[in-house]
Amino acid sequence: MNYHDIITIDPGKRSGKPCIRGMRITVYDILEYLAGGMTEAEILEDFSELTSKDIKACLAFAADREKKLFVVSL
């Protein structure tokens, strides 16, 4: 999924954390809700401005970031 049009980073908003479409809802917020047991439907019900595509973009962003992590052995 191409999340680049959905996930935005603005230094002046939420301390530069990745947000959804310029809103104040961060990728971390969505991931925390999902990890806490909320379903996609529950998140969409609580945040009517979000779409299913927004939530999938958060997951794709997190997966991409995880893929870029690596361990350096000393």
Image: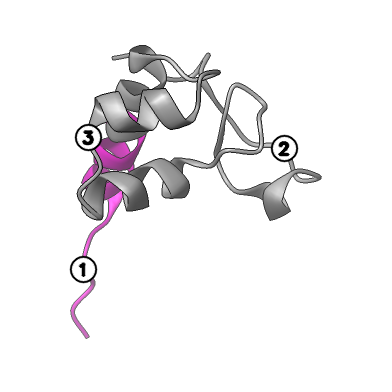
Whether residue 2 is visible, yes or no, is no
Q: Which residue is mark 2?
A: 10
Distance of label 1 from label 3 (alpha carbons) = 32 Å
The stretch drawn in magenta includes residue 70: yes
Which three-letter amino acid code belongs to the residue tagged 2?
A: Asp
Which quadrant is home to the C terminus?
A: bottom left
Relative to 13, 66 lies left or right? left
Circle 2 crowding by C-alpha within 10 Å: few under 14, some 14–19, many from 20: few
* Image coords of residue 47 (percent x, y): 50, 28
Front position among marks 1 and 2 = 2
Which residue is at a point 36% across and 32% down the rendered structure image? 43
Q: Which residues are magenta?
A: 60-74
Q: Which residue is mark 1?
A: 71
Which residue is at a point 39% across and 41% down the rendered structure image? 30
Which label is found at residue 39? 3
Which three-letter amino acid code belongs to the residue tagged 3?
A: Thr
Q: Nearer the viewer, residue 53 or 60?
A: 53
Q: Element under label 3?
A: loop
* Image coords of residue 8 (percent x, y): 60, 29
The stretch drawn in magenta includes residue 49: no
* Image coords of residue 66 (percent x, y): 25, 48
* Image coords of residue 7 (percent x, y): 51, 27
